[in-house]
Amino acid sequence: MKSSKELKELDEAIAQSLLQPDYRPSKKEEFMSGKQLEYFRQKLLRWKKELIIESTGTIEYLKQDSLNSADLNDRASLETEHSFELRTRDRYRKLIAKIDEALQNIETGEYGYCEITGNPIPLERLEARPIANMTVQAQEEYERSEKTRKDERE
């Protein structure tokens, strides 16, 4: 199974961290210093591992529940649960893709900087949403322009 191999690789990458367990990035440090990059890399790897474990649980759940129930109400309930599980799994898949993109940005030196303005993304924002690729202001402007384009199409 691919996910068990991937989990082992994630465990190895997480174990290689040289950071102190209580380390937190500080504004006093150079922005996106080696320590800060490693901190966010570890945070992203741990998050990815959690999502993969959750996804594996979803697959197992879907395999064991049978839709062959004779009772229509039971079957409808199971179909609703399966639909919810599949939406959750799709959300995880999208999050994992964003995590992979953020990890790639760490490797290329682009992590922590807004893809629109090039300005540093505040540490507080990255701490809360490590996959952020825009400052709050750039994100708000992007969302406003998307809403305007959507309204114009309707």
Image: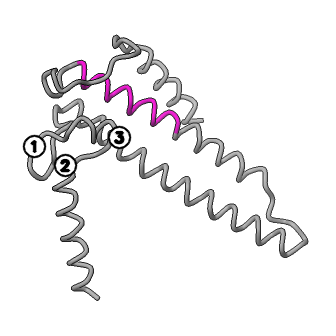
Q: Are marks 3 and 1 in contact (CB under 8 Å)?
A: no
Viewer-closest of 129 and 3? 129
Q: Earlier in the sequence, mark 3 or mark 2?
A: 3
For disc 1, the marked residue is 119
* 70 in the magenta segment: no
Task: Give the answer, above or below, for where 143 lies relative to 18.
Answer: below
Viewer-closest of 26 and 106? 26
* Label 2: how many Cα within 10 Å (few below 14, some 14–19, many 20+): many
Viewer-closest of 23 and 97? 23
* Furthest residue toward right: 70
Query: Helix, strand or loop at disc 2?
Result: loop
* Label 1: how many Cα within 10 Å (few below 14, some 14–19, many 20+): few
Between label 3 and label 1, give the one nearer the viewer. Answer: 3
The quarter of the image holding the C terminus is bottom left
Q: Which disc is residue 135 wearing?
A: 2
Query: Helix, strand or loop at disc 1?
Result: loop
- Tell me which segment is drawn in magenta: 35-50
For disc 3, the marked residue is 128
Q: Earlier in the sequence, mark 1 or mark 2?
A: 1
